[in-house]
């Protein structure tokens, strides 16, 4: 099944190319369009296509710039440039960006079918070079599952390092690597569920816009998060980790408490805790902490015996001007103006 993206600012040409794709008999998972390079990049972030057909001359971002940005992504996207006869020399500049084929306007059925066959052939070659056996995925998943189930943190760290090294030897394209780590995580998560383990988190889905480094960080954080959840469950810990974090932060609003400190207190991996906190509160750790500090500041400002300079320290701002600036951004007025509105002089 193939994912295809067509980029052209002329609606008639987009519709014509769509029709040619639909008539090709190609097994299609998705067929999407974009009217310029900016929209195309948004589509690519949402879902990486296998094949991309793009015009050269378009508003906002032309085809050449689009090809350049795709090349920087190091994504396994096969690009076909569609150009008018007068743009052909200009279109050839795209070769340095890994463009596979060219199509001259007007596009005919025979030429389009020939290019499509070449793309499929190239894709099959890439797939064979990037093939990772299912038995290998099963083996990796088994090792991780065992380490998580036995709460062997050091063993899990070693397994993750070894798997990263082994996976790196395959020289996978970024989107293929993303698919692989998602599949491994799905296997581990599913096997733990079969063991009748209740997990707080649902199975997360990896973002299509991550870099290779971020893909691996997502994977390791997610797997380590499973171990932390299981560890908490076996301790008979009934408290919600996010609620426990909120209570800890509330007691330490006057201090510069970091996300890492709170994560350590509740026994979770910092990266996983950050994701869990955002998922449950719809706010980042910093956004939540700032809001709670400002809400506390407002309560103190309503008490005449509190000096504003003392209030800033009480809510964790040693730098009074920083407190004033943050309060105004949050409330829309200075602390002194807020106090006046409350009828306090």
Image (cartoon, rainbow, N blue to C red):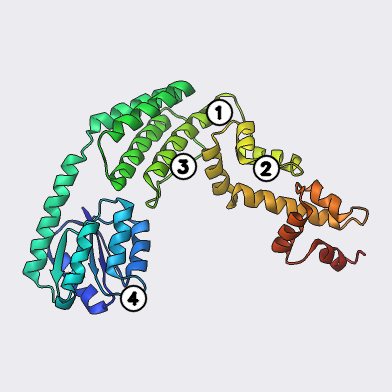
Image quadrant in which you'd find residue 34: bottom left
Q: Residue under circle 1?
A: 233
Neighbourhood count class around disc 4 (C-alpha, 10 Å): few under 14, some 14–19, many 20 upward: few
- Relative depth, front residue between 299 and 322: 322
Q: Position of residue 337 (x, y in %)?
A: 83, 66
- Select label 2 or label 3 by which is in front: 2
Circle on res. 202: 3
Contact? badges 4 and 3 (CB < 8 Å): no
Q: Position of residue 12 (x, y in %)?
A: 23, 79
- Select label 4 or label 1 by which is in front: 4
- Select label 4 or label 3 by which is in front: 4
- Judged from the image, the secondary structure of the residue bearing numbered disc 2 is helix
Classify residue 38 as left or right of residue 100. Answer: right
| Mark before the other along the chain sequence, 1 or 3 | 3
- Judged from the image, the secondary structure of the residue bearing numbered disc 1 is helix
| Mark before the other along the chain sequence, 4 or 3 | 4
């Amino acid at each position: 099944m193939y994912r295809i993206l067509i980029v052209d600012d002329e609606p008639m040409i987009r519709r014509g190319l769509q029709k040619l794709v639909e008539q090709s008999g190609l097994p299609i998972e998705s067929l999407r369009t974009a009217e310029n390079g900016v929209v195309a990049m948004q589509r690519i972030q949402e879902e990486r296509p296998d094949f991309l057909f793009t015009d050269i001359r378009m508003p906002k971002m032309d085809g050449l710039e689009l090809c350049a940005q795709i090349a920087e992504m190091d994504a396994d996207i096969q690009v076909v440039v569609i150009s008018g006869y007068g743009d052909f020399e200009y279109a050839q500049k795209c070769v340095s960006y890994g463009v596979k084929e060219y199509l001259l306007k007007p596009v005919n059925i025979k030429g389009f079918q020939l290019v499509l066959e070449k793309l499929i052939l190239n894709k099959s070659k890439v797939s064979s070079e990037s093939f990772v056996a299912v038995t290998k995925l099963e083996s990796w998943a088994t090792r991780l599952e065992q380490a998580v189930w036995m709460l062997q943190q050091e063993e899990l760290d070693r397994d993750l390092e070894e798997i990263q090294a082994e996976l790196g030897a395959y020289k996978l394209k970024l989107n293929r690597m993303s698919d692989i780590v998602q599949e491994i995580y799905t296997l581990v998560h599913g096997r733990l569920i079969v063991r009748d383990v209740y997990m707080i988190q649902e199975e997360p889905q990896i973002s299509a816009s991550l870099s290779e480094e971020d893909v691996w960080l997502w994977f390791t954080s997610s797997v380590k998060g499973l171990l932390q959840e299981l560890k908490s469950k076996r301790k008979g810990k009934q408290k919600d980790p996010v609620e426990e974090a909120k209570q800890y932060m509330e007691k330490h609003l006057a201090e510069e408490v970091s996300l890492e400190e709170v994560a350590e207190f509740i026994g979770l991996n910092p990266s996983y805790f950050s994701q869990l906190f955002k998922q449950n509160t719809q706010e980042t750790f910093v956004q939540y902490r700032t809001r709670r500090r400002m809400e506390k500041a407002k309560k103190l400002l309503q008490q005449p015996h509190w000096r504003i300079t003392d209030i800033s320290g009480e809510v964790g701002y040693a730098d009074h001007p920083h407190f004033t600036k943050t309060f105004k951004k949050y409330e829309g007025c200075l602390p002194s103006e807020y106090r006046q509105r409350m009828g306090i002089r």
